[in-house]
Image: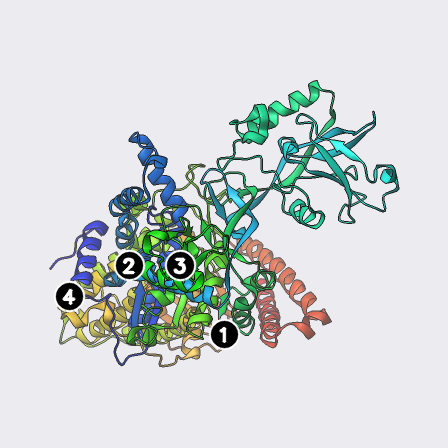
Amino acid sequence: MALEAKYNAKSIEDKWYKYWMDNNYFHSEVDERTPYTIVIPPPNVTGVLHMGHMLNNTLQDVLIRRARLKGFNACWVPGTDHASIATEAKVVAKLKADGIDKANLSREEFLEHAWEWTHKHGGIILEQLKKLGASCDWERTKFTMDDNMSASVIKVFVDLYEKGNIYRGYRMVNWDPQAKTTLSDEEVIHEEKQGNLYYLNYKIEGSDETLTIATTRPETILGDTAICINPNDERFTHLKGKKAIVPVCNRVIPIIEDEYVDVEFGTGCLKVTPAHDENDKMLGDKHGLEVIDILNDDGTLNSFGMHYEGKDRFVVRKEIVKELEGMGVVLKIETHMHKVGTSERTGAVIEPKLSDQWFLKMKELAQPALDAVLEKDVKLVPEKFINTYRHWMENVRDWNISRQLLWGQQIPAYFYGDGKEDFVVAENLEAAVEKARTKSGNANLTTSDLTQDPDALDTWFSSWLWPISVFNGILEPDNKEINYYYPTNDLVTAPEILFFWVARMIIAGYEYRGEKPFTNVYLTGIVRDKQRRKMSKSLGNSPDPIKLMDKYGADGVRVGMLLSSPAGNDLMFDEDLCKQGSGFVNKIWNAYRLIDGWEVSETKEETETAGIAVKWYRSKFQKTLAELEDQYSKYRISDALMSTYKLIWDDFCSWFLEMVKPGYQEPISAKTYKEIISILEDNLKVLHPFVPFISEEIWQHISERSANEALIVSKWPASEGFDEQLNAEFDFAAEVVAGIRTIRKEKNISFKDAISMSVINNEKASEGFDVVISKLGNISQLDYISEAIDGALTFRVKSNEYFIPVAGAIDVEEEIAKLSEELKYTEGFLKSVQGKLKNERFVNNAPDQVVAIERKKEADAIAKIEMIKTSLASLK
C-alpha cells in the first residue's frame, strides 16, 4: 500500500487508538510478570483538559508505554475526583439558572441533581485524554464516589475514630463564605496584599481619656470583647483594671494584661475579638472572655452587626469607617501590606470562624511518611522538594476533614441526644443504632431516633486512599490485585498538591498497608506562557489542548510539551514548540517514505559505504540507548526525548540515510535494505513512548503484523554495548564532510560536480570512513600527501589539513586574513582554558573527568595554533 505524501495525523490517530482499544492492549490482569503500576492523579469530575493535564498525562503515558515495551505488566489506573467544593458550586449555579434554590431542596433531591451533572460532564476529560493517546486501563476507571470507593472512605473514618485519631472539636477554622464551608490550612492561599491600617480611639470608661488600637478589619470591632496590654508596658500602667468602650456598639469591655502583646508593635494596645482571630481566641480562652461571632456563613453581618445586619463584610468595612470618622474616632489611616488568606477553590477571602468540626490527629500518623521520604524509600524527583516536605510534615497540624457540603461522603456520625457527646460513629445506620443503645443505655432507641451528621468529608479524605482503594485494598485488604499491584511504581503529579495529596497518600499507605504507596514521585513544573505567567482562563493565555492537537497532531503536541519540561521546573510553553514537534513527526514520516520508495535488488552486493554506515549506526544507537536508560532512571524525560530527537533527526535522517541511499535510479541491495528496516524498527521502539501514533503506523506498514506483533507490545531494544572508537571516527569524518560542504557552498561548486581532495593526516585519523567522506562529499579521488598544495582551497579538522585543487580558486590575501582571524580566536580560546587550569581551586575541586576535558581542549588548541602558523608560513 502506497504511503500518503503528507502525514494525516487525525485519521492515523483515530485508527490506531481504536486498534489498541479493540485489542485490549491497555488492560492489565494479575499474571506472572513483574507489575509496573501508575495511578492517575484523578482530575476533577467537572473539569476539561488543560495544559497542566496535558503535561502530566503525557509524562505518565511515556512511562507506561516504555514499561510495556520493557516487558512489565503495565497498569495505568484512570479515574476522576468528585471535587466537593468545585462540583457543588457548579451544580448550585446550574440550579440557580433553572430558578431552583439549593436551600429549598432536600439532601436527596440535591444529590439527584449532582449525579445528573456528574453523569453529563464527568467523562469529558477522560475522553479528551484518549485523544492525547493516553494508554490507561479504561476498564479500571474509578470515581471517588463509586459505591466501593465511598465504602472504603467510611470504613477508614470509623477505624480512625475508634483508634482515637479522629475527634470532634469546637475550633477556629478557615471559613470560605462563598462556598459556605470550612477549609483545611492547605486549601488556603496566603497572598501579600495592600490594605489599610486604621487607628481608632476607644474611650476609657468613666473618663475623657482614650486609648488607640490599630486594625486592618474595622468591621470586627463589633465583636471586640477586650483590650489587651502588656503588663510590662509602662505607658499603660494607669489602665490596669479599667474598662474601655467599643465605638458604635458602645459595649463596655475589660482591659486585660498579657505578655503576648508585643510592646514594639503597633500602638501597644491590642483589640481582642475571639470569634474572628485564632490568636485572639487563645487569649480569650486564657482570660475567660466572651465570644461574639458577628458574621453569617455567607460573610454578611448578623444581628450583632446592629444596623449593618445583612450587609457584606467588605461593604460594612467602608461604611463603618465613614461612621467612625463622623464620630471623630479615626485617628489616622495608613496603607499597609499584609498577608490575606484566600480560598484555593473559590478565591474568596477566608474568615477565621469558630465551629464544631471533625479533625484527624496528624502528628503520629505523619511520622512513618516523613521517615519514608527522608530515608529515600519514597524518592521525590527532583530532590529539592525534600526540605519543603520535611518542613510541612514536622510542623503538621490536625487535619480538618469535615465540610459543610452535600456532595461527598456523608460523615458516618449519628446523633441521638441533646448533649455534645450524644453521638456514635458507625459504618451504617443499623450498626449506629446498636452502638447508640449501648452508649446511651436506652435499649428502645430506633433508627428514627438517630440523625446523621449532615456534613460531608473533605474530598482529599477520599483521594488519600486512591492507590489502595482503586484495587479495593481497604474493603478486601488481602485480595490478589492489591497484593500484586501495590505498592505502585511511579506517581506523576504537580508540586502544589505535595501536601494535599502526596503526603497524605504516603500516610494512608503506612497506616493501612504498612508500606509506601509508590516508590518514585515525579513532580512536574507549572506550565507558563512566554512571559512566565501561569496559564489560566482568567488571563486568556492558555491554549485549548484539543485545538492544539487538531492543528499539530497528538504526537506533535506531545513532543512540544516535553521538549522543555524538566522535573520540578516550570515549562515555558510556546505554540512554536508544538510546531517543532509536528515538524519532527513529518521528518520521521518523510524518512520512511524515502526508504519505502527504494527499489530492492536481491542480486546487488552491499556497498562498502553501506556496510560501514550500518556498523556505525548500530553503535551510535547503542550509545544513545545507554543514555536513554540513564535518563529514564533519573526521570529526565525531557532529556530522553532530546536524545531520541537528535538520534532520529541528525544521526538517522541526516547522516545514516544519506550514507546508505542508493545512487539515482539505482536499486539498493536486499542485505542493506534488511539492515535498514531492522534499524528503523529499533528506532520506532525508542520513539514509541513519545510519538505512539506515527510509530505504530510505520511499524504496521513495514510488514503485516498479527495482533501480538503490534509495536505497542513489542520488545524494547536489547543493550549490546557500543564501539566508542568507531563513534569517534565517524564524528571526525562528519566534520570533514561538513568542511567539504562549506567550501562547495562558499565557492559555489555544485554538489553534483565530483572533485578530488588531498589530506595531510597529522591526526593519524582512521581511513575507515574515507568511502563515506567520498560519497557524501562527492569526492572522486582522495589522496594522502605530506606537503601542502599551493593554490588549493583548504580547510582543517583538528590538525588535519584538507586540500581541494580548483584552478585559480584561492585568493591568497583572503586566505591569510581568514587564517589570521582564526589564529587570533584560537589563541584567545587557549588563554581562557589555560587560565582555568591555572586555577588551583578548579583543578582540585572539579571532577577528574571535567579537568581531563579541559586539558584535552588545551592540547587541541596548541596543535591547531601550530598548524595555522604552518599554513600561514606557506602562504607568505
The answer to whether mark 1 and mark 3 are in CB contact below 8 A is no
- Residue 465, located in which quarter of the rendered image? bottom left
Residue ID at (22%, 76%): 606
SS at circle 3: helix
- Residue 741, located in which quarter of the rendered image? bottom left
Residue mark closest to the camera, 1 vs 2: 2
For residue 250, above or below residue 533: above
The answer to whether mark 1 and mark 4 are in CB contact below 8 A is no
Sequence-first disc among 1 and 2: 2
Residue ID at (68%, 43%): 289
Q: Horizontally, is 77 left or right of 321 in the view?
A: left
Residue hosting label 4: 599
Q: Position of residue 5 (x, y in %)?
A: 19, 52
For residue 326, above or below residue 361: above
SS at circle 4: loop
The quadrant of the picture occupied by the N terminus is bottom left
Sequence-first disc among 2 and 4: 2
Sequence-first disc among 1 and 3: 1
Q: Position of residue 305 (x, y in %)?
A: 58, 29
Q: Amino acid at mark 4?
A: Glu
Q: Amino acid at mark 2?
A: Asp
Residue hosting label 3: 463
Q: Position of residue 698 (x, y in %)?
A: 21, 62
Residue mark closest to the camera, 1 vs 4: 1
Number of the label disc, if any, that sits on residue 147? 2
Residue hosting label 1: 377
For residue 40, above or below residue 606: above
Task: Give me the C-alpha separation between circle 3 and circle 4.
Answer: 58 Å
Sequence-first disc among 3 and 4: 3
Task: Give me the C-alpha separation between circle 3 and circle 2.
Answer: 14 Å
Task: Give me the C-alpha separation between circle 2 and circle 4.
Answer: 61 Å
